[in-house]
């Protein structure tokens, strides 16, 4: 049995959003590093509260594993001369390894026989390795933002106050800046702030709980969920569940204590989203609903301390919420006095970006693009789409959205309905912001989808046009998310509109702001979308080689590309799939640098090349009809019948004949075959099973 490794990093309160990522990193990193260091271990557990990040590793070996390391040296043929004496290469290698030439071994490799030095390494004590390793491990924990404090060089999410580092009950001695490791933890900042010593995981979990700290976030989350539901039930209601809020609250507190509160029923007249945002987004309160999902005038709040008098705590929370709801009511009433068209006029004085003009100019640009898209996918919606495009940003200059930015679109829908707009227009105003996050809900209406696409394409194209291009680590304008939103909306709707035509139309609306040639912007935007589309498809489990093969042929018609990918993946099970892929690659290799030409039947010298040509003529006619209708599966099924004539051709015909006319005629025949297959995908990019085994 090994020993327990315990590590606790005590800090000032770390923002809740920083912790999940940090925990995931710690679990991965410690596993990787202990493996690299040849230290056997058991289960790894990472936990956290706002004031501490904790790591436990069970059954850690007391010593590194003993091991043999082998290092290759020069080839044997270069290591000894004709008399068998070691050369400078052999002598230098042995000297570098600290051994005599006679101690070198000979090993066989794919490239021949080489000299090798084998070293037997005795494992060091784990405690000594950990003392050296843990400081760098702590410093490697990633956070969205880090800070320095006092005159120290260390950067961390928040200032460090203590480090608990124990291996087998003994302190692992090390120092990070002004903090020395020890075996003491600390309790809840307010309810039990003192230190206490621990020697094991069991003791740590017991004593932290005794000092009002529940370290395990899963336990805290379940406790919050259960207690909040219980409190809501006492109010004859149900919790309006929100997993994002639940996770945030979980990482905001160390010891949850639930209290319920009430607000004036008159505020239920406010739009539902206003109430929910006021409670859940701003105050971190859970809303309460009745059995039909309607909001009740109650809320549930979770405190970080046990309330001595819950009524006093509830009154304080009610006072804060009452003030916020009163403000919301005032903003709502004032905003209703101003029509959304006035909001659009106000956008003439709002700069969207210093390089991209005002928000009003942006609306006018994507209004044109939305009209173009509507004409291509649903001309009957032209007037609705134009109205949505004009009004969809009108709520940005309202007091409600200024106070609650997350309600943009939501309030636009509400105000549109109140001023008598068509409900379809109002819903599309809200939907044009969707999806608001990766994997989020897509617009349901065609009008909302069209304006959403237009708005997002305008943003992406304009950013590329003024050189605000995402980098590997930075995407401040969320262009990756917006591009995926466009792709998924089009796939969801099944619209046959191509990206290149939309980008071209978008570029026509912004010629005056472009900082580089439009053709370069167009090329970069299309490549950007192709990369996003490819990444999404592969992350969804699509075969990488099939995705590559299809997107190399068609990457701007997303619906068509998906149909091709699905057809090729289904075709993999066909018995002729693998031989055809191999034959196609052979054809492509032979045709390298061949410009193409006409096929002259009179130049055929064998029945096999004549039979291949006749088979091609028959099958291509059938395949073309399938391709024209987008039936790629049927087209591939027809092409599969070319396998036997292709095999017979390659077995009996010398393509690269000495006679130039015959050679060109045969190459032209193969070129026809290649063109037919290229109508679906570039099969030369497909990795055959035999090639996979070689890899």
Image (cartoon, rainbow, N blue to C red):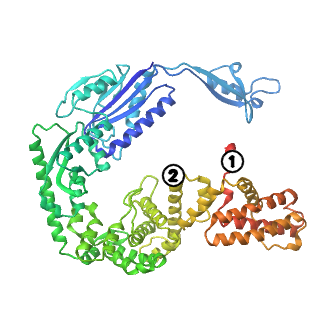
Kindly state the secondary structure of the residue where label 2 is placed: helix
Write the residue at 25% across / 69% down.
Answer: 414
Q: Position of residue 286 (x, y in %)?
A: 23, 50
Which quadrant, please, contains the N terminus? Answer: top left
Give the label on residue 539, or none: 2
Q: Which of the marked residues, 1 or 2, is nearer the chain's N terminus?
A: 2
Q: Nearer the viewer, residue 310 or 328?
A: 310
Q: Nearer the viewer, residue 314 or 349?
A: 314
Q: Using residue 431 as the reference point, say whether residue 695 is left or right of it.
A: right
One can see residue 251 in this view: no
One can see residue 49 in this view: yes
Q: Position of residue 49 (x, y in %)?
A: 28, 37
Which quadrant, please, contains the C terminus? Answer: top right
Q: Position of residue 348 (x, y in %)?
A: 29, 76
Q: Which residue is mark 1?
A: 689
Q: Position of residue 423 (x, y in %)?
A: 30, 74
The answer to whether mark 1 and mark 2 are in CB contact below 8 A is no
Q: Using residue 211 as the reference point, say whether residue 490 is left or right of it.
A: right
Write the residue at 72% across / 63% down.
Answer: 639
Write the residue at 22% across / 54% down.
Answer: 290
């Amino acid at each position: 049995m090994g020993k327990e490794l315990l590590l606790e990093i005590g800090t000032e309160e770390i923002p809740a959003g920083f912790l999940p990522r940090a925990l995931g990193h710690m679990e991965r990193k410690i596993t990787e590093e202990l493996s690299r260091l040849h230290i056997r271990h058991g289960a790894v557990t990472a936990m956290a509260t706002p004031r501490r990040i904790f790591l436990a590793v069970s059954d850690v070996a007391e010593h590194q594993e003993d091991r043999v390391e082998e290092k290759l040296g020069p080839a044997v043929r270069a290591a000894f001369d004709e008399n068998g004496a070691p050369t400078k290469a052999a002598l230098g290698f042995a000297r570098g390894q600290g051994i005599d030439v006679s101690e070198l071994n000979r090993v066989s490799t794919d490239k021949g026989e080489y000299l090798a030095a084998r070293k037997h390494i005795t494992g060091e004590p784990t405690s000594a390795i950990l003392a050296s390793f843990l400081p760098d491990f702590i410093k490697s924990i990633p956070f969205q933002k880090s800070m320095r404090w006092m005159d120290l060089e260390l950067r961390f999410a928040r200032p460090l106050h203590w480090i608990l580092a124990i291996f087998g009950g003994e302190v692992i001695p090390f120092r990070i800046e002004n903090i020395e490791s020890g075996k003491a933890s600390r309790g809840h900042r307010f309810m039990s702030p003192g230190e206490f010593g621990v020697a094991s995981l069991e003791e740590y979990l017991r004593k932290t709980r005794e000092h009002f700290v529940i370290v395990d976030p899963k336990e805290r989350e379940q406790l919050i969920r259960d207690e909040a539901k219980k409190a809501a039930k006492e109010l004859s209601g149900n919790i309006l569940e929100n997993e994002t809020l639940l996770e945030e609250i979980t990482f905001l507190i160390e010891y949850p204590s639930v209290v319920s509160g009430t607000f004036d029923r008159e505020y239920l007249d406010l739009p539902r989203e206003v109430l929910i945002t006021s409670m859940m987004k701003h105050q971190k309160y859970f809303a309460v609903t009745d059995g039909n999902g309607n909001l009740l005038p109650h809320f549930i709040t979770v405190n970080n301390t046990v309330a001595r008098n819950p009524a006093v705590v509830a009154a304080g929370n009610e006072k804060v919420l009452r003030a916020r709801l009163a403000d919301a009511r005032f903003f709502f009433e004032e905003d209703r006095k101003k029509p959304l068209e006035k909001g659009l006029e106000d956008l003439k004085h709002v700069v969207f970006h210093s390089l991209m003009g005002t928000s009003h100019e942006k609306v006018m640009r994507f209004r044109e693009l939305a009209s173009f898209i509507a004409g291509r996918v649903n001309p009957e919606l032209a007037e609705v789409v134009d109205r949505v495009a004009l009004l969809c940003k009108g709520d940005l200059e309202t007091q409600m959205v200024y106070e609650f930015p997350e309600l943009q679109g939501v309030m636009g829908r509400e105000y549109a309905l109140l001023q008598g707009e068509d409900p379809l227009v109002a819903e599309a105003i809200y939907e044009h912001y969707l999806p608001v996050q990766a994997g989020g809900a897509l617009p349901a209406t065609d009008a909302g989808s069209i304006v959403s696409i237009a708005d997002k394409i305008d943003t992406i194209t304009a950013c590329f046009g003024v050189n605000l291009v995402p980098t590997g680590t930075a995407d401040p304008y969320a262009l990756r998310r917006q591009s995926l939103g466009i792709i998924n909306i089009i796939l969801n709707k099944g619209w046959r509109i191509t990206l290149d035509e939309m980008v071209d139309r978008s570029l026509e609306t912004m010629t005056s702001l472009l900082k580089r040639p439009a053709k370069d912007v167009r090329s970069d935007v299309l490549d950007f979308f192709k990369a996003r589309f490819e990444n999404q498809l592969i992350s969804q489990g699509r075969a990488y080689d099939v995705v590559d093969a299809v997107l190399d042929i068609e990457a701007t018609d997303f619906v068509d590309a998906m149909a091709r990918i699905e057809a090729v993946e289904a075709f993999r099970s066909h018995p002729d799939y693998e031989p055809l892929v191999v034959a196609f690659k052979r054809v492509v290799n032979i045709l390298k640098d061949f410009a193409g030409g006409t096929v002259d039947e009179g130049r055929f010298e064998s029945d096999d090349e004549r039979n291949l040509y006749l088979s091609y003529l028959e099958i291509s006619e059938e395949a073309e009809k399938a391709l024209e209708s987008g039936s790629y599966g049927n087209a591939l099924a027809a092409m599969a019948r070319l396998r036997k004539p292709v095999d017979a051709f390659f077995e009996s015909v010398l393509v690269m004949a000495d006679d130039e006319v015959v050679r060109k005629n045969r190459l032209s025949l193969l070129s026809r075959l290649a063109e037919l297959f290229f109508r679906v995908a570039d099969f030369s990019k497909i990795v055959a099973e035999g090639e996979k085994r070689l890899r």
